[in-house]
Amino acid sequence: MLSFEEASARVAGADVDQPVEDDEIGETLADLGVAFVVPGYDVDDLEESYRSVLQDAGRVAGVRIHDIRLDGGELHWRRDGEPVSWHVEHLSDAYLDHLACFEFVHLLEPDDERTFHSMPQQESGDDSVYVLASAEQARRLSEELGLVFD
């Protein structure tokens, strides 16, 4: 997924001799640039939070996500200039719609063999983590590192 040099540059200054705790795996993968995280905690601003999540996903996938706006129950944005939208539901103005993110994450994927693989949440309210990997990379992450994907 990353060359040794890329991984080293992305974790420069981090204490790489210490094991990553289970609850830090998603953030660590995001720091490495191979995943993005949908926060499970309450947010201050839904539109700004969706903007941040979509832009993070775009960086991981290598696509440009822009013109993001939340209009009632619809999230509108552009992917490399093309309009995209998906339906979102909010029981509260403080939490992102994780089910919509799960259902529509494929709209963020690059035009190659890689897809976003969802890591299961351990508890309600946990972050949702999406790892961009080919089927072979996902298999190796599971076999060699014990990562589980939905």
Image (cartoon, rainbow, N blue to C red):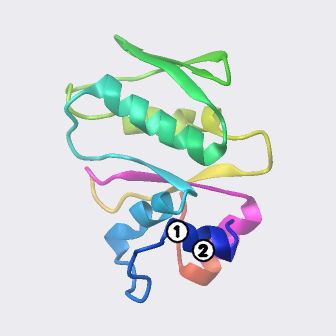
- Image coords of residue 135 (percent x, y): 74, 61
Tell me whether the residue at label 1 lies in contact with that at label 2, contact meaning CB atoms closer than 8 angstroms: yes
The amino acid beneath tag 1 is Val
**Where residue 148 is drawn, which disc sits there?**
1
Q: Position of residue 91 (x, y in %)?
A: 23, 26
> Can you say whether 136 is above or below 134 in the image?
below
Q: Residues within 10 Å of mark 1 (few under 14, many from 20)?
A: some
Q: Which residue is mark 2?
A: 142
Q: Which of the 4 image quarters holds residue 126?
A: bottom left
Q: How many marks?
A: 2
In the image, taking residue 40 as reference, residue 58 lies left or right, namely right
Q: As shown in the figure, which amino acid type bears the numbered disc 2?
A: Ser
Segment tinted magenta in the rendering: 125-142
Judged from the image, the secondary structure of the residue bearing numbered disc 1 is: loop
Looking at the rendered structure, which numbered label has been put on residue 54?
A: none
Q: Quick one: 89 or 80, which is closer to the camera? A: 80
* Residue most extreme to the top: 71
Between residue 84 and residue 51, name the one nearer to us: 51
